[in-house]
Amino acid sequence: MAEHRGKVRSYFVNRLFKKVIFPESDIVGLDLRFEKQRLWLQRAAIAGAVGIILFSTYAWWNSYDNNKTHVDKMDNYVETYCIERNESCIGKTRKLEKADFKGILPALDNLQKAAQIYPTLLRENEDSVPVSMRLGLYQGYQLSPSAHEAYYRVLNKVFLRHIAVYLYNQIAEQLKAGVTDDSEGFLYQNLKVYLMLREEYVKKLDPELLQVWMSDEWEKDFDIHSNDQERLQAHLKALLQSDIIPVKQTELEDRALVDNSRKILLSKERSLQLYWQVKEEAEGVKLSPFSVSSELGEPVTRVFASQRGGDILALEIPGLFTYEGYCGFFKNEVKRVVKDSLEENWVLGLKEQGLMNKTQSKKLTRDIQELYFDEYIKRWKELVYLFEIIRLSDIDTTVRMLDTASIPNSPMRRLLQKVGQNTMLLCESEAEKIANASALDSTLKMGQAVGIATAGSILNRKRRLEAARNKGKKEKDPALMVAEVFEPLFKLVHHDPENETYRKEEFYPILEKLGEVRELLNKPQAEMSWTKRNDAIGDLEGIADQMALHQPVKDWIDYIIDRSKSLINHVVDDRETAAAREKEREEAEAAAKAAIKKAEDEEKDRQKKIADMNKQWQDKVLAEYNKLQEFYPLSEDGKDMPLPSFAKFFGPGGTLDQFFDEHLATYINKAIWRFSDNPLGLSRNLLKSFREAEAIQDGFFPSGSQASVSFYLSAEDLVGTEVEQFSLLLGEQKFEYAFGPTRESKLEWPANGTKIQFMTSSGARVALQQYGEWAWFRILDDEVMPTGNKLVFTTGDAIMECKMRVDSIVNPFYLVHSKVLSSFDLPQRLN
């Protein structure tokens, strides 16, 4: 490149110095401190500007983020709601048949949370909007109204319809199960709450009643937990704070259900329905019951027990049936209930003015009062009649009972006072309460006995009771019917605390005499006498009769009198008859000794007698029997027993008969073979032996002391090849049969030898043959056992059947065959 040879121009440099550097030369300082300050100020300004920019950016971003978070939350809640209640979101509708509070609760919760994201604010009150959500990004004004509107719309269109369906189904189930006296009030209230939700009765809506009713129903539903109950109650509260969209009749088609419910309720006694309603409301108020434990205390157990068993301290009466329950609740509540009932005729489909007159109102009130007072009387009667005096089993128990029963603060007296306090139902005014309180203070200062603390109040009521009785019949207080029933009891313990002490009570003489009986029973037994017994117990009995006590007081006193008499009589009788009893004891001991000696002597005589009898039994009877045991028929394999020996032992007047007549006839009844008396302890085996011996005697000795048996044979059938005739030889006697007419032949035993044979064309065939006097028995025993009265003889194919008949009562042949003779045995000893 060629070198530039031209003239150098200084235009740019010249203008830099003249226009920039030189004009601004004044701002350049030589003071270093000042220059540093200026530099730091410049830096601070820059930093501040940057900070403002960053803060503004952060504030805007924070507002954006907060608003976006709220919008996202609402979007999530709405989306979740749409999932839970898809049909509601897409606009589909269907008829609801069953309430599902637990099912719709998540959807309601989500929509409620969406509505609570932004507070309900007016545009004029922008200061209430958090700063962190401003800067022109706040969305609450647009979203909050829509969320609240959607929430309340769902509360009306969904939640309220579920409540209506729930109440509808409850009424339907109750009608299906049947309406009882106990459930009438429930049906009425259920119908009332249901109708409040209807379009034509929405002006009658009682938000508090609806909340209480549904809260109670949710508490009774085991599927709905306590946390769910609180959430449902919150939704219901929100619903009632909005403009309710009532349920139209066409939505549930409930005309028949409502008409049936009204028809049933109108068929029932109105007063009974309202009375049950009053009782239900009393349970909600939780009136203090009359408790025996708190009102009478532990001392009552020392005097009384419960007739039905159990702890008497556990007995109680509901608070509605006490003086406070009547005056503090029922008296005013019944008027309110009647008034409300007459104003609620719309529930029953009646015109509101239909019963709104004083006459009908008074009649309805009086009917309810009568139901109440009837139950009032019943409950107090049941309680009082359950009290009975504890079991007085001995003097110590009776004394301990009278220790408590006879004092001024006796449980008897206190019970009667409590009966009076709670059955004289004449309510005091506030002025009377103040006056009675003053009288009470003065009475307590006087140091009167326990029990008169309420005397002023009771006396005042007693005076007003007398005044009320003097009024005209039309003005008579219905509460008097209770007082009239129990007056015979509570009048026993009433007195005027201003002028008298409790000693002037009608019941005081009873307590005084109970104390005297207690003193008598508490004395040593030696000091008790008939006179003292008659004085104390007789006086108590006389006073009780004179006062004509009513039940159950009469039963209490009569039982104490009877038991005291019995216990003292026992003590006195024991003491006065001690000598006689001692003499009787000595005589008894002497008689016992004599009886023992007599028994010992008798035992010695018995032992001697049985020993002598055993010796004679063994020497005379057993010795002879042992000799005969080896002979037939006592021994199946033995030789034939000589008939004289057989007759001497078994025959009439023989050895056994003689011994029985001489030694055993006194102790044995031969008719039934039982011991008529057995002081010697004779063996029961002896009865068996002599019973068998009698059977042997009846069979072998039918007509005398010699053994003989008459029997008859007749042929029945003869079969066999070539058999022509049957022959039986019994000693010299002969029985034959040869296929001809049958005839009965008489044979007699004893006979020496027996032979049985069948005749054929070829000669005689001997079937059986035995020798000796017992031959016939041996044949029957060995071969031809008699079956009933039938004998069968056989040899080869030859068979002869005969029928046998015996004259004697006992068949001797059967005795031999059945082993009665061969098994006959005598005991070694008689005892």
Image: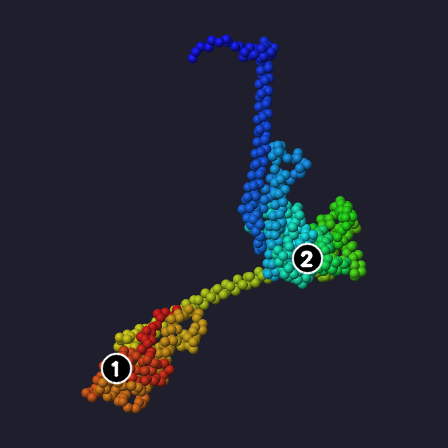
Q: Quadrant of residue 657?
A: bottom left
The image position of residue 35, as x and y in percent, is 58, 12
Rendered residue at 32%/86% (across/down): 712
In the foreground, 304 or 253: 253
Q: Which residue is mark 1?
A: 794
Rendered residue at 65%/38% (across/down): 121
Q: Can residue 824 be seen from the camera position used here?
A: yes
Identified by mark 2, the residue type is Val
Report the label total.
2
Q: Which disc number belongs to residue 474?
A: none
Rendered residue at 33%/82% (across/down): 789
The image position of residue 266, as x and y in percent, is 68, 62
Identified by mark 1, the residue type is Thr
The image position of residue 505, as x and y in percent, is 75, 54
Classify the position of the C terminus by image quarter: bottom left
> Label 2 vs label 1: CA separation?
111 Å
Rendered residue at 61%/45% (across/down): 150
Q: Secondary structure at mark 1?
A: strand
Q: Quadrant of residue 532?
A: bottom right
Classify the position of the N terminus by image quarter: top left
Above or below 362: residue 38: above
The image position of residue 628, as x and y in percent, is 30, 75
Q: Which residue is mark 2?
A: 347
